[in-house]
Amino acid sequence: MSSSNSTVPYHVGSCLCGTIRYSLSSPPTQCVLCHCNNCQKSSGSAFMTNNWYPANVHTPFPPPCSAI
Ligand SMILES: [Zn+2]
């Protein structure tokens, strides 16, 4: 998905419980499938997908009041 409209996020996401949420305004600059031991342990799989974004495209959402 891509968009030239800067008001529409490229991607929105959260942690599994939804307490930490974020939006990204552009696609990643780099994507890597890493097979190192740390990434295998973190993902519980044979590899982990890592994406890099410029710092200025990330917007964290404040946590909901019930999570504080
Ligand atoms: Zn790794």
Image (cartoon, helix red, strand yellow):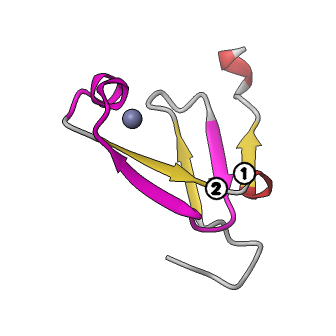
Q: Which mark is residue 25?
A: none
Closer to us: 52 or 27: 52
Q: Is residue 54 above or below residue 4?
A: above
For the residues bearing labels 2 and 1, Cβ distance under 8 angstroms: yes
Q: CA distance from mark 2 to mark 1?
A: 8 Å
Tell me residue 55's x, y (percent): 76, 51
Numbered range of the magenta stretch: 21-45
10 Å crowding of disc 2: few (<14), some (14-19), many (20+): some
**Looking at this view, is 36 or 58 the one in front?**
36
Q: Residue furthest top?
A: 68
Magenta highlight on residue 33: yes
In front: mark 2 or mark 1? 2
Outermost right residue: 56
Residue at horizontal 76%, vertical 34%? Answer: 62
The residue at the far left in this view is 46
- Image location (x, y in percent) of residue 15: 50, 33
Circle on res. 53: 2
* In this rendering, position of residue 61 left or right of residue 30: right
Residue at which label 1 appears: 58
At 59% from the left and 64% from the top, the residue drawn is 29
Dot 1 amino acid type = His
In this picture, is 66 found above or below 10? above
* Upstream in sequence: badge 2 or badge 1: 2
Residue type (three-letter) at the residue carrying disc 2: Tyr
